[in-house]
Image (cartoon, grey):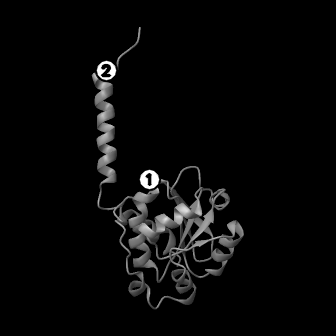
Amino acid sequence: MKKRPTLVTALAVLALTALFASGCGSSSGGDYGGQHPDYAGALDGSPAPLAALHAQADKLIPGGTGAYEKRIAALHGYPIVANVWASWCGPCRFEFPVLQRLSARYGKRVAFIGVNSQDSDDTASSFLEEAPLSYPSYTDPDSKIAESIGAGLGLPDTAFYDSTGKLVFLKQGPYSHNTELEADVKRYALKSG
């Protein structure tokens, strides 16, 4: 005898669908709408190592773990926020506006770096045209960079390094609002930077 779904099960599925849809419709994250923010004005006058990052805005940087670690070392003296993302990842897309805003707000004091994991360069580049960033992303098709920082089991992940380049915190999952990421920037990046 085949069981039919009960009314309770149907209502639970409907409630979960509504909850998910309302979270994704929030104006806090997810609304990049193809806008190309003017990062240049907000980031003018950045120190040379941070200005070098801003000059590579929206670029995908090859070189794997070695290139990523070299950049972390070159940013000695500045706290770093490294976001692991993929263009196919819904939660990653949802948090991009939060990263856009906070990287512009703190980009003169904090280095922001992306790690594009488990993605193709073409797809990632197309997405960055829709949702531009003020910083580059390192290509990580085989998740080696993500694994080196303890990330990559689920995306997105955000790693916080202190000004000496020491990994001090790894957040798994998306930031849905500016205040969440800002609190972690202040707690983990700026406390020593």
Give the residue type at disc 2.
Thr
Disc nearest the viewer among 2 and 1: 1
Relative to 104, say whether 173 is above or below.
above
Q: Residues within 10 Å of mark 1 (few under 14, many from 20)?
A: some
Looking at the picture, tell me which residue is in the foreground, 12 or 119: 119
**In the displayed structure image, the side of residue 185 where residue 177 appears, left or right:** left
Q: Residue 23: horizontal and vertical position, in percent? A: 32, 51
**In the displayed structure image, the side of residue 138 where residue 87 appears, left or right:** left
Quadrant of the image occupied by residue 33: bottom left
Q: Residue 35: horizontal and vertical position, in percent? A: 35, 71
Q: Secondary structure at mark 1?
A: helix
Q: Residue 65: horizontal and vertical position, in percent? A: 69, 66
Residue topped by disc 1: 90
Quadrant of the image occupied by residue 11: top left
Query: Furthest residue to the right?
Result: 66
Q: Residues within 10 Å of mark 2 (few under 14, many from 20)?
A: few
Residue 152 - label: none
Relative to 88, say whether 167 is above or below.
below
Quadrant of the image occupied by residue 102: bottom left
Residue topped by disc 2: 6
Relative to 3, say whether 60 is above or below.
below
Give the residue type at disc 1.
Gly
